[in-house]
Image (cartoon, rainbow, N blue to C red):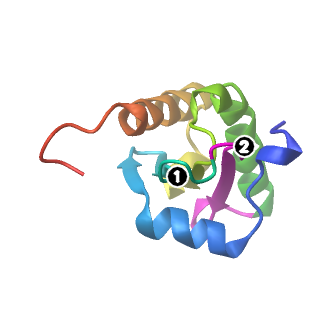
Amino acid sequence: MLPSGNRMRRRDDFTLAVRRGRRAGRPNVVVHLLQPDENAGADAPPLVGFIVARTVGNAVVRNAVRRRLRHLMRQHLDRLPAGSLLVVRANPRAGTARPDETAADLESALDRLLRPASKGRR
């Protein structure tokens, strides 16, 4: 389970991360990461939120996908910069994907977002 202090709850945080953050898409998940400006939020813990739409499946499937994503993100919390906002959105394919496929997609997307940005690209 994801610690309570790292759970994103405010709609404004979700909107901010999705609209202004960097994005990495994979077949099962899309990850949005908004890193804080220098000096801003340096002491705040990283916040993680999840979006699992109805297109993923019925309520049982959506909750299972959300629980799986929360469990997977717990082991990656230490990689996130302090004060950052991370939103993990499950794609429709995540409802039928094997857990190892979802884990690989999530890790790949995080690796891409946490890699230093190369020159000329945002």
Front-most of residues 105 and 24: 24
Q: Is residue 35 left or right of residue 78?
A: left
Q: Quadrant of residue 13?
A: bottom right
Q: Splitting the image into 4 quarters, where does residue 82 fall?
A: top right
The quadrant in which the N terminus is found is: top right
Res. 57 image quadrant: bottom right
Q: Is residue 115 magenta?
A: no
Mark 1 closeness class: few <14, some 14–19, many ≥20 residues within 10 Å: some
Q: Position of residue 52 (x, y in %)?
A: 64, 60
Residue at the front extreme? 39
Magenta-drawn segment: 42-58
Q: Residue at x 47, y 35 (%)?
A: 110
Q: Relative to residue 109, is residue 36 depicted above or below?
A: below
Q: Residue at x 57, y 67 (%)?
A: 55
* Residue 117 x, y percent position in the rendering: 27, 39
Per the image, label 2 sits on a secondary structure element best described as loop
Going by the numbered disc 1, the residue's amino acid type is: Pro
Q: Which residue is mark 1?
A: 36
- The picture places residue 98, in percent across and down from the top left corner, at 58, 32
Placement of 60 over or under 67, stated as above or below:
below
Residue farthest toward the left in the current orientation of the protein: 120
> Mark 2 and mark 1: span between their CA atoms?
11 Å
Left or right position of 5 against 98: right
Viewed as shown, does residue 9 lie left or right of 120? right
Q: Amino acid at mark 2?
A: Pro
> Which residue sits at x=51%, y=36%?
106
Are there few (<14), some (14-19), or many (20+) residues within 10 Å of tag 2?
Answer: some
- Residue located beneath label 2 in the image: 45
Residue 53 visible in this rendered orientation of the protein: no
- Looking at the image, can residue 48 be seen? yes
Foreground residue among 21 and 29: 21
